[in-house]
Amino acid sequence: MKKITLLASALLMTAATFGQNVLIDRIADNSTGLISTLGDDGTGVYCADYFSLTSDVALGDLTVYGLNSNFGAIEPFTTGFNVYIYEISGSIPGGNPEVAGSGVLELGDIDPSLYTLTEDGAGSSEFKINITDANGGNQVVLPAGVYWVSVFPSVLGGPAEDGRWNWFGSLSSFPNQEPVLIDPSDLFGAGAQNWTNITGLIGEPFPSFAWNLTDEPAASIGDNLAEMIAVYPNPTTDVLNLNIPSSIEVTNVAMYDVLGKNVGAVYSNGTINTSSFAQGVYTLKVETTSGTLTQKVVKQ
């Protein structure tokens, strides 16, 4: 098999992230990048960078900086983007993108409509993804701890062809662990079929990759109760069902008429019998250990 170098170099595209609550900011000040790409044949080469969090955080925007190896636009080749986060295992990630279920976050083949790709015309590129949007509108809250992140586009062709993307390095950021690379199918013949230290692999310093991560205000469970608790049928004629996750403990249920009078609803085994109530609009109030849900209910 033809040997292909893992490295790629180019003039850097200047990029900056403005805003508050920056968790990670590793600038693209290294002209060298390492391949991190998944081809449409199912084979790929993946890089990962170490990071730590001192408190629980809701992940916001992730921005990564890289280079298309043919120094042209990567957009025509790109079919999606991937973000994987792993817990640490010893000194390496506790999984890899070709082992489903091994990550704490696995956002595979994120649709292009859910991220922004910016290119400078000379091969440098920037992918920006809002983690909540990419996760179907559900926030991702990571507990305090140490993790590895692996990012890469899905492209047309093999990972070593025209659509190959290289993740830029950062020379000015020195995490506790140096970045690693895995080539499960040994496409490059370097024997890196398990996570391998990049500095040792390429024979030159490579302290980290270039990326930026912000947080966002964490929505409390109470804020999301309307999505977690199903109340049906609404309108109702007799029995009103409340489908409540087993992780949420109900402390009180009441219904009020338009004058604010408690109509004495009895909640039992996930249901309220409304057959004796007059037709009209009521306010259902469900108090739980995770917050309070207030919802209008129509009795027909």
Image: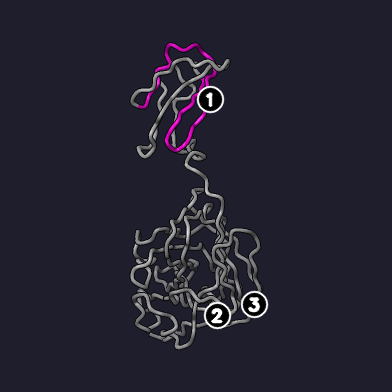
Q: Position of residue 32 (x, y in %)?
A: 54, 82
What's the mark number on residue 296? 1
Q: Which residue is mark 2?
A: 171
Which circle, 2 or 3, is nearer the viewer? 2
Q: Position of residue 61 (x, y in %)?
A: 56, 59
Q: Nearer the viewer, residue 94 or 55?
A: 55
Q: Is residue 131 magenta?
A: no
**Residue drawn where x is 39% and y is 71% of the image:** 43
Name the kind of residue labelled 2 in the image. Leu
Q: Position of residue 300 (x, y in %)?
A: 49, 16
Residues at marks 2 and 3 touching, judged by CB atoms closer than 8 Å: no
- Gap in Å between the C-alphas at discs 1 and 2? 57 Å
Q: Nearer the viewer, residue 54 or 229?
A: 54
Q: Position of residue 14 (x, y in %)?
A: 66, 74
Q: Of all residues shown, which one is farthest toward the bottom? A: 203
Q: Which residue is mark 3?
A: 122
Residue 10 shown left or right of residue 294 in the figure? right
Range drawn in magenta: 270-298
Helix, strand or loop at mark 2: loop
**Residue drawn where x is 54% and y is 18% of the image:** 281
Name the kind of residue labelled 1 in the image. Lys
